[in-house]
Image (cartoon, rainbow, N blue to C red):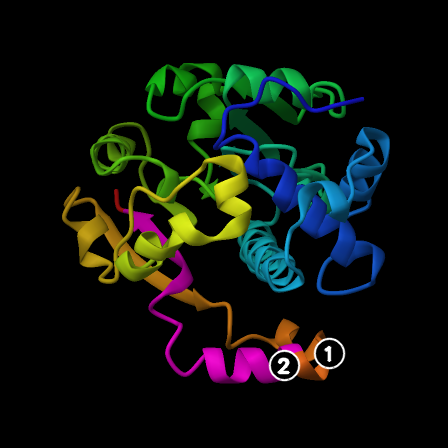
Amino acid sequence: MEFINLSSTASTLLITLYSRANMSRQGLIIKDEKAEEIIQLAGYSQKKLKAAKSHQIFLTIRAKLIDDYTLNFIRKHDGNCTIIQVACGLDSRYIRMNDDRIKWYDLDLYGTIELRKKFYKNSKNYKMIESNVCNFSWVNKIDPEDLKKPTLIIAEGLFMYLSKEDNVNVFSTLPTYFKDVDVIFDAFSPLVKTVSKYVPTLRRTNAYFSFAFKDPKVIENMSNKIKHKQTLSYQRNKYVKELSLPFRIFYFFKKIFADKMSRIEVFHIEK
């Protein structure tokens, strides 16, 4: 089986998928048996994807930090909540949460969802939606009762690829449909945006960053209903301790200046 007809941005899902699968096989940071299975079925390898080990670690820590936040959100609400993951790619976060009490929606573009359906199935508590996140018609495909529950919106590896105009559209429109909701996503500084065009992995996929910010007020200014809640650091977390000595040293020096350059942000949409 081969992955075909993916846009340049969508093709980055192969890199994140392989990263999680490879780290999972090594018993590092995350356990993602579904990623291992898909990579094996598709016949993709490090040789084909050429993703640097440091980049794989970064992507896997990103996934794990979002996993942890999601799990805590579910526990806080005793499973009586809704999770909406936009730009889901081939991610198996729903399976990793292993909680059939929650209602989960995975959203992505048509081609990616068609590919995803080769490996995942809709069920009573899980649904895949084909849509562009900027087209809010996808909200109508969510059960109205689920919209009344505490909700977490996950956008991993998305907003940096959208234009500033699209980001303004998304963040200014979300409060129209969602109240008292958390939104978690990864963010980069303008400097990282500038140098992203020279990152070998991104150059091979022709996917480049279009949106970046340092100050959370950039997002807050898009709507008076959105407030910054929390910043999660890639460098200052327990998973770095699981790495080999060279990578622990790498992250030790990186954390001195890198928290503003790349991090995970959590915002809250107020009632």
Q: How many marks?
A: 2
- Residue span colored magenta: 247-269
Disc 1, disc 2: CB below 8 Å? yes
Estimate the x, y position of residue 229 in percent, counting from the top left: 33, 60
Q: Secondary structure at mark 1?
A: loop
For badge 2, the amino acid type reads Arg
Which residue is depicted at the point 25% across and 55% down?
Answer: 213
Image quadrant occupied by the C terminus: top left
- In the rendered view, would you say 29 is above or below 90? below
Query: Camera-side residue: 194 or 58?
Result: 194
Query: Camera-side residue: 140 or 218?
Result: 218
Q: Which mark identifies residue 244?
A: 1
* Residue 260 sits in quarter: bottom left
Q: Is residue 167 left or right of residue 159?
A: left
Estimate the x, y position of residue 148 in percent, counting from the top left: 42, 31
* Residue 16 sits in quarter: top right
Query: Camera-side residue: 27 or 71?
Result: 27
For badge 1, the amino acid type reads Ser
Which residue is depicted at the point 37% across and 78% down?
Answer: 257
Q: Secondary structure at mark 2?
A: helix
Which residue is depicted at the point 24% across and 59% down?
Answer: 216
Q: Which mark identifies residue 248?
A: 2
Asked if residue 13 shows in the view, the reply is: yes
